Image (cartoon, helix red, strand yellow):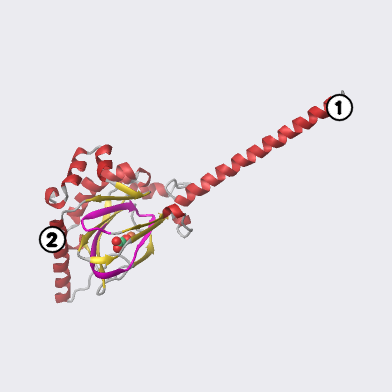
């Protein structure tokens, strides 16, 4: 792990300063819960792509069968499997957890302690697109490594808990992001998303699914409401609105009864 050769100076400085303000100064949030920032040096992206290509060539030559990154992608490789596990651990510990601690505290952002790291590849000879899904992660880092491509936008549709994963999205949850080489996207694993077709060229992205065993354990004992789920929050607001409306009606009826009683007494007097 050589931070200075891996990361762009603005990212290095924000992490070294390690204050909420320094992190906020380099991160944009074009849609709630979707963070983006300049991260990797072009030279590092090239080296990582070359390493993946070497590995794939070796796999082809030796007729080895390798694990694909996940159940959805047929192309790409698991980086942990060819010597990059320690480097990715350091990436998560030293560079992703400081950010997720500030921006994603409700899903164990401060306690990320394991990862699944892989690259995905899209284009005419690779995967074309990626269906709508949630990741098996608390926080996902997705960085475009290149090469040249068009299309391949990420589409987001709001964060949901297990119970609400198939519910509709609100207009404000709909967001499309166009990948830029070297630029990172950080989002919750439960933020529903997919990738549109890469219509030309070759797109390679680095994915780090970061997990928190503490959060996973705590989730087992959690009641039915998740404050990070868009639909839970909407239902909670709706319940509060209905309860306020019901209280108001009761008060109105009581006032009316009081008013009638008053006039009955006046007329009897
Ligand atoms: O292709 C992309 O940029 C998205 C990949 C992704 O969502 C995943 O591998 O979980
Ligand atoms: Fe994903």
Residue 60 numbered tag: none
Q: What residue is at 15 percent from the left and 72 percent from the top?
A: 57
- Between 79 and 20, the one nearer to me in the picture: 20
Q: What residue is at 59 percent from the left and 39 percent from the top?
A: 244
Q: Secondary structure at mark 2?
A: helix
Specify the quadrant of the image occupied by residue 144: bottom left
Query: What residue would you read off at disc 2?
Result: 47
Q: Secondary structure at mark 1?
A: helix
Distance between mark 1 and mark 2 Cα atoms: 94 Å
Cβ at disc 2 under 8 Å from ligand 1:
no
Q: What residue is at 25 percent from the left and 50 percent from the top?
A: 37
Residue 267 numbered tag: 1
Highlighted range, magenta = 179-207
For residue 262, side relative to residue 99 (left or right): right
Q: Is residue 253 in sight in this rendering?
A: yes
Q: Is residue 110 in sight in this rendering?
A: no
- Between 221 and 187, the one nearer to me in the picture: 187
The answer to the question of whether label 1 and label 2 lie on touching residues, with beta carbons closer than 8 A, is no
State which mark lies toward you, 1 or 2.
Answer: 1
């Amino acid at each position: 792990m050589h931070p200075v050769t891996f990361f762009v100076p603005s990212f290095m400085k924000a992490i070294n300063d390690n204050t909420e303000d320094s992190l906020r100064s380099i991160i944009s949030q074009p849609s709630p819960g979707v963070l983006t920032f300049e991260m990797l040096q072009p030279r590092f992206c090239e080296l990582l792509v070359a390493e993946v290509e070497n590995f794939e060539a070796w796999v082809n030559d030796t007729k080895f069968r390798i694990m694909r990154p996940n159940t959805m992608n047929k192309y790409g490789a698991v980086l942990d499997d060819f010597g990059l596990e320690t480097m990715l651990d350091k990436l998560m510990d030293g560079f992703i957890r400081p950010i997720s601690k500030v921006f994603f505290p409700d899903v164990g952002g401060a306690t990320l302690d394991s990862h699944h790291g892989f690259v995905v590849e899209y284009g005419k000879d690779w995967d074309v697109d990626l269906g709508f899904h949630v990741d098996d992660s608390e926080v996902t880092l997705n960085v475009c490594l290149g090469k040249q491509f068009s299309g391949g936008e990420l589409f987001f549709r709001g964060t949901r808990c297990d119970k609400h994963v198939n519910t509709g999205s609100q207009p404000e949850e709909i967001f499309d992001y166009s990948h830029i080489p070297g630029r990172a996207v950080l989002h919750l694993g439960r933020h529903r998303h997919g990738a549109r077709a890469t219509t030309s060229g070759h797109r390679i992205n680095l994915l780090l699914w970061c997990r928190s065993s503490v959060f996973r354990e705590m989730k087992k004992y959690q009641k039915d409401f998740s404050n990070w789920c868009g639909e839970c929050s909407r239902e909670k607001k709706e319940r509060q609105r209905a309860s306020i409306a019901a209280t108001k009606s009761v008060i109105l009826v009581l006032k009316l009864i009081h008013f009638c009683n008053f006039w009955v007494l006046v007329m009897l007097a």
